[in-house]
């Protein structure tokens, strides 16, 4: 009984860690996605499709996507690396 329960727990943990949609299908995570915005900077946009898929398929997978930063959209190629501060 304990062996079966432990095998089931391991299987659930493996499936949950591998079933996060943005981590699997979002491509490589870059530095922009990993770093938290500083105070006053705009928040990072979230990949809505991956979030909805995570919620429908396996809700705890959203934790994996947010922890890795894969749920956030990568920075656009023409966007500045740091946001511009308004002139006073």
Image (spheres, rainbow, N blue to C red):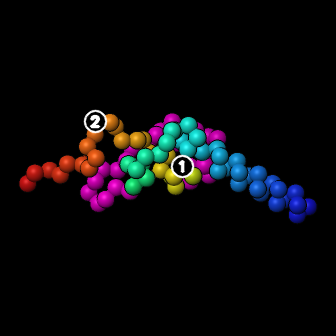
Disc 1 on helix, strand or loop? helix
What percent of the width, then of the height, locates residue 57?
Answer: 64, 41
Which residue is outermost to the left?
Answer: 88
Specify start and end residues of the magenta stretch as a single range.
36-63
**Horizontal and vertical percent position of residue 47:** 46, 40
Q: Nearer the viewer, mark 1 or mark 2?
A: 2
Residue marked by disc 2: 78
Say which residue appears at 65% left-offset and 46% top-offset. 18
- Residue in view at x 20 percent, y 48 percent: 84
Residue count near mark 1 (Cα–Cα under 10 Å), binned few <14, some 14–19, many ≥20? many
Residue drawn at 82 percent across, 56 percent down: 7
Residue visible at 35% across and 50% down? 43
Vertical relation: 78 (above or below) 32: above
Is there CB contact under 8 Å for labels 1 and 2? Answer: no
Left or right for 5, reference 77: right
Residue 59 visible, this orientation = no
On whether residue 51 falls in the magenta region, the answer is yes
Residue 65 — which label?
1
């Amino acid at each position: 009984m304990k062996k079966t329960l432990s095998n089931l727990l391991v299987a659930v943990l493996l499936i949950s860690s591998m079933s996060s949609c943005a981590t699997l299908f979002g491509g490589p995570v870059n530095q922009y996605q990993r770093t938290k915005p500083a105070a006053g900077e705009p928040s990072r946009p979230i990949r809505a499709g991956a979030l909805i898929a995570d919620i429908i398929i396996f809700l705890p997978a959203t934790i994996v996507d947010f922890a890795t930063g894969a749920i956030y959209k990568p920075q656009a190629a023409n966007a500045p690396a740091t946001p511009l501060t308004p002139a006073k």
